[in-house]
Image: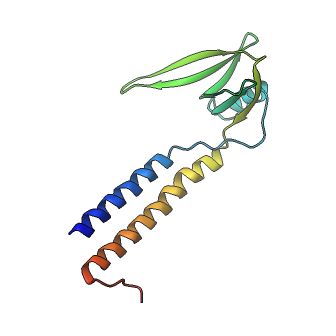
């Protein structure tokens, strides 16, 4: 019984790790400037996450980058239970070193493939542990 409870703990740790990996965002390797980040937002139907890298080493993640009256803004979502609020932060373009935009294909692929493969591994490990605890010998001989 001790083996079974310890294996359940291990399985729960593995599954919680998989849940945390689901929300990853992959950015393009090629850096762009603010104008190109705004264009990427327009091309992708008003949604393209961006990560702004500043000359002082700081970074800022944006839900989208918009340009209004020669000023750039970082728009972010603030989710609440039943409503979504958007915040707009002015971007000081002199401090910006470069911007990386979201690679949607890789983000979606990683968000689907990693949890599915991880779940298969966890289930296979659980079956192996259960069979080992029942029979006392490892099933693969």
Quarter of the N terminus within the rendering: bottom left
Position of 129 compared to 72: left or right?
left
Residue reaching furthest to the front? 2
- Give above or below for 67 relative to 126: above
Q: Where does residue 92 sit, x and y in percent of width and height?
A: 72, 15
Residue at x 41%, y 85% (from the top left corner):
140
Residue reaching furthest to the left? 1
Residue at x 43%, y 61% (from the top left corner):
119
Residue at x 38%, y 54% (from the top left corner):
13
Position of 113 compared to 81: left or right?
right
- Give above or below for 103 relative to 48: below
Q: Of 53 and 103, which appears nearest the observer?
A: 53
Q: Where does residue 37 sit, x and y in percent of width and height?
A: 73, 29
Quarter of the C terminus within the rendering: bottom left
Residue reaching furthest to the bottom? 141
Position of 82 compared to 30: left or right?
left
Residue at x 67%, y 43% (from the top left corner):
103
Quarter occupied by residue 90: top right
Q: Where does residue 44 sit, x and y in percent of width and height?
A: 66, 35
Q: Of 86 and 23, which appears nearest the observer?
A: 23
Position of 124 compared to 57: left or right?
left
Q: Where does residue 41 sit, x and y in percent of width and height?
A: 68, 30
The colour style of the image is: rainbow
Q: So how many labels did they put on this image? A: 0
């Amino acid at each position: 019984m001790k083996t079974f409870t310890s294996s359940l703990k291990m399985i729960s740790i593995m599954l919680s790790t998989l849940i945390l990996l689901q929300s990853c965002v992959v950015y393009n390797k090629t850096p762009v400037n603010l104008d190109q980040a705004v264009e990427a937002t327009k091309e992708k139907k008003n949604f393209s996450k961006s990560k702004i890298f500043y000359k002082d080493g700081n970074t800022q993640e944006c839900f989208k980058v918009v340009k209004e009256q020669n000023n750039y803004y970082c728009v972010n979502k603030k989710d609440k239970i039943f409503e979504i609020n958007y915040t707009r932060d002015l971007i000081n373009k002199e401090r910006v070193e470069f911007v990386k935009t979201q690679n949607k294909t890789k983000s979606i692929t990683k968000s689907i493939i990693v949890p599915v493969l991880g779940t298969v591994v966890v289930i296979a490990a659980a079956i192996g542990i259960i069979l080992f605890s029942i029979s006392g010998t490892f099933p693969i001989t």
